[in-house]
């Protein structure tokens, strides 16, 4: 491999902004598989037919970047991974946002089709070692950095003297009703207090909807908390946040996106879940100041007067070496394939191909289904024999 010709297929509406970053690389084509069915198609994966309809010419590519490790049997994502594997296209998977818990994501990062899992920053490698008690390399975790945030850092910069004078509030739903999270974020009461406070201040407020829940309906049909009618609801791209004086949120990855462009962030203090090693690093380690509701008016005045000066080293701890992530990533991929010292990858690749071929021959999605078929056949024979 002398040059990169990569593709990336995304499957969720909240990942479209990643495609914008990848398109700027010059060596990656992007595709979006839109789901149009179900209670909340914005937050669920499409079926395989939606990918087939895109008619992607996989033979044009020698690398795949993935920002989605989860997949459903028979769905578009699994078909995409198989298409790459069958053509010998190596898949580099990447963390697409700030995950609540290392313990929760470890079992499927990387998945059976992807070899490496590139975390947003070294923070995640340290959390892995702390929570799991093993080296991240044992799970094929690496940290080159966030391509999305590298793109935002290079191309957009907040200017406190050139804003629209507004406050931007992020939509961060309770994750119980939105996605049946077993250890949920519960923040709607904090947001209710926030909007009540903002209503008493002489400020203009926009409310940025979450791309996965634009209609305030959860994945299983439950109604989510929504702001009062006086607040203007907007659906804006990440770079447009530089137009605002301040961005306010509790736990969203978008807070880090804002920080990578120098946008002042007010991080709402709330009871962050602690189960399964959950940890809100940006607040706990001091990148953001955890702010109580009653402190917000004075903090807004302070930010408008003095701005915010982020600790760049700490920001890079969460997002990777901003300013050089894209270059480092391209170099890593090329070196990784020019110097096949990664025998473990070749072994992994052969193992996965054997599994896929076995599944194809046996006509089953999973090997365990094959043994279940054998069991059922024996049971049928014993029951029906004369």
Image (cartoon, rainbow, N blue to C red):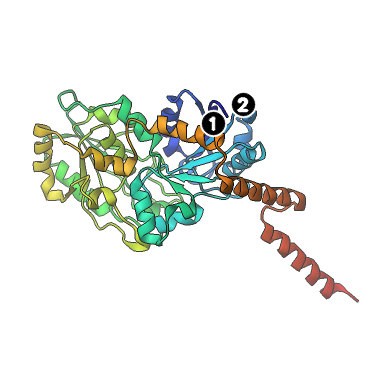
Q: Residue at x 49, y 50 (%)?
A: 140
Is residue 206 visible to the viewer in this orientation of the structure?
yes
The answer to which of 370 and 50 lies nearer the viewer is: 370
**Residue 255, quarter of picture:** top left
Question: Residue 7 — which label?
Answer: 1
- Residue positioned 33% across, 32% down in the render: 238
Q: How crowded is mark 2: few (under 14 residues within 10 Å), some or many (20 or more)?
A: few
Along the horizontal axis of the image, is 264 left or right of 334? Answer: left
Task: Report how many numbered discs are placed on residues in the image.
Answer: 2
- Which residue does the image show at 24% across and 54% down from the upper left? 189
Q: Do the residues labelled 1 and 2 touch (CB within 8 Å)?
A: yes
Q: Which of 279 and 378 is in front in this view?
A: 279
Left or right placement of residue 125 versus residue 202 in this view:
right
Residue 314 is situated, as x and y percent measured from the top left of the image, at 25, 43
Residue 176 visible? The answer is no
- The quadrant where residue 320 appears: top left
The crowding category of the residue bearing disc 1, from other C-alpha atoms within 10 Å (few below 14, some 14 to 19, many at least 20), is many
Give the structural element (helix, strand or loop) at label 1: strand
Above or below 326: residue 183: below
Residue beneath label 2, please? 60
Q: Assign a secondary structure to mark 2.
A: helix
Residue placed furthest toward the bottom:
386
Q: Position of residue 330 (x, y in %)?
A: 46, 31
Q: Which callout, 1 or 2, points at the residue further toward the start of the chain?
A: 1
Q: Position of residue 100 (x, y in %)?
A: 36, 53
Label drawn at residue 311: none
Question: Residues under labels 1 and 2: Cα distance?
Answer: 9 Å
């Amino acid at each position: 491999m002398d040059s990169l010709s990569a593709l990336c297929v995304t499957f969720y509406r909240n990942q479209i902004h990643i495609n914008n970053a990848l398109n700027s690389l010059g060596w990656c084509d992007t595709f979006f598989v839109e789901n149009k069915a179900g209670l909340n198609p914005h937050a669920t994966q499409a079926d395989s037919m939606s990918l087939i309809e895109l008619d992607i010419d996989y033979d044009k590519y020698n690398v795949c970047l993935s920002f989605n490790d989860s997949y459903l049997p028979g769905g578009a994502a699994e078909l995409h991974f198989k298409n790459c594997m069958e053509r010998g296209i190596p898949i580099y998977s990447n963390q697409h946002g700030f995950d609540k818990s290392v313990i929760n994501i470890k079992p499927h990062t990387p998945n059976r089709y992807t070899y490496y899992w590139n975390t947003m920053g070294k923070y995640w490698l340290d959390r892995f070692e702390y929570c799991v008690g093993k080296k991240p390399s044992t799970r094929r975790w690496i940290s080159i950095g966030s391509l999305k945030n590298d793109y935002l850092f290079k191309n957009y910069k907040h200017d406190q003297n050139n804003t629209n004078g507004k406050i931007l509030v992020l939509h961060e739903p309770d994750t119980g009703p939105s996605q049946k999270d077993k250890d949920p974020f519960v923040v709607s009461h904090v947001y209710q207090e926030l909007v009540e406070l903002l209503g008493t201040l002489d400020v203009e407020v926009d409310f940025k909807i979450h791309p996965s829940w634009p209609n305030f309906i959860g994945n299983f049909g439950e109604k989510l908390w929504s702001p009062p009618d006086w607040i203007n609801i907007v659906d804006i791209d990440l770079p447009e946040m530089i137009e605002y004086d301040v961005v306010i949120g509790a736990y969203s990855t978008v807070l880090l996106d804002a920080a990578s462009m120098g946008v002042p962030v007010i991080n709402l203090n709330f009871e962050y879940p602690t189960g399964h090693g959950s940890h809100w690093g940006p607040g706990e380690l001091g990148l953001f100041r955890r702010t109580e509701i009653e402190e917000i008016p004075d903090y807004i005045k302070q930010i408008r007067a003095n701005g915010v000066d982020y600790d760049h080293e700490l920001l890079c701890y969460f997002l990777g070496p901003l300013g050089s992530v894209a270059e480092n990533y391209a170099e890593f991929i090329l070196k990784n394939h020019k110097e096949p010292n990664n025998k473990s990858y070749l072994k992994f690749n052969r193992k996965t191909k054997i599994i896929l071929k076995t599944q194809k021959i046996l006509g089953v999605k999973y090997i365990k289904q094959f043994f279940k078929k054998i069991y059922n056949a024996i049971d049928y024979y014993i029951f029906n024999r004369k």
